[in-house]
Amino acid sequence: MKSIFLPFRLPFLLFLVFWGFVGGCSETGTRQTPASSSDKPTIVSLAPSITEMIYAIGAEKQLAGRTSACDWPANVKKVKIVGAFGKPSLEVLAGLSPDLVLDNDLADENMGAKITELGIKRERLTVRTPEDIPPALRKLGALTGNSEKADSLAYLIENGLEKFRSRIDVAASSPKVYLEIWDDPLWTGGKSSYVSALISYAGGRNIGDAVEKEYFEVSPEWVIRQNPDIIACMYMSRDSDVAAKVSSRPGWKHTAAVKNSRVFDDFDNNIFLRPGPRVLEGIEQLSRIIDQAEAED
């Protein structure tokens, strides 16, 4: 067994369960007092991926509030919590009175209108694919008065994606990858998912591409029939060795991944499941696994 090393659109209940597990944030926090001016607005982030972008472009001193799912980088835990992912408290927002609220998805879209009624500017950053990240960074830079650093980072990511683009290959020889997002029930990413794009950039074939969905529930029998060469478990171990547990599932010993000890766990969920500034790091780590599998075949 080998071991190495969020916003995708799962049904909202499962999404909240997932973030509740990996978020690691308490419902308390102390407010930072960010500098505020006409070109450096105070910000509230309603998504972990946006929070990571805020820090990546150097706008962290402007961050006045975040969600309980925003757990990276570590310093973000000093920032006041305004609610759960996509579900802010209007009372807390009114108390903070930020200049700008940023979201990528809301549990209740009527919440957007209510935020505006408070006199707070609201903007949405839509990021569904790796290619969406650079434009989102540029937009964030313009909104927050940090365009220079945001533009530089966007350019860096664009160049990095272009270098990985040559690895996108759907040839029959490319290793088949089963990316398990959750284990009870089993969930994976479909053809239109963010994680499927990461697998493609890394040089693999996502077995979930057989389904025209973003994220969906699968059966153990379905995974066995697909016979993946690599199994990647994108969730933290709770009470046992995840890779060992997956390998011991009834019937899974017949898959190529288990036969060849290519079941991996201990991933950093934040890197792989959140479309954000660390996208190249995620692709690079996944590509090492795929390269290793190809070298051994």
Image (cartoon, rainbow, N blue to C red):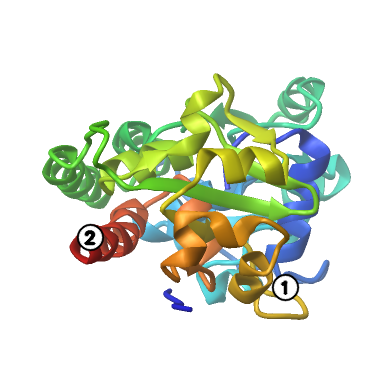
Left or right: 164 in relation to 234 = left
Q: Residue at x 22, y 47 (%)?
A: 157
Query: Is residue 234 among the parts visible in the rendering?
Result: no
In this view of the protein, which residue sits in the foreground, 227 or 15?
Answer: 227
The residue positioned farthest toward the right in the image shown: 91
Circle 2 crowding by C-alpha within 10 Å: few under 14, some 14–19, many from 20: some
Name the residue carrying label 1: 30
Residue 224 horizontal/vertical position (percent): 60, 46
Quarter of the view holding residue 114 = top right
Name the residue carrying label 2: 291
In the image, residue 30 above or below residue 216: below
Q: Residue at x 18, y 45 (%)?
A: 164
Q: Residue at x 71, y 62 (%)?
A: 249
Left or right: 193 in relation to 104 = left
Q: Amino acid at mark 2?
A: Asp
Query: Is residue 182 among the parts visible in the rendering?
Result: yes
In this view of the protein, which residue sits in the foreground, 208 or 112?
Answer: 208
The tag earlier along the polypeptide, 1 or 2, is: 1
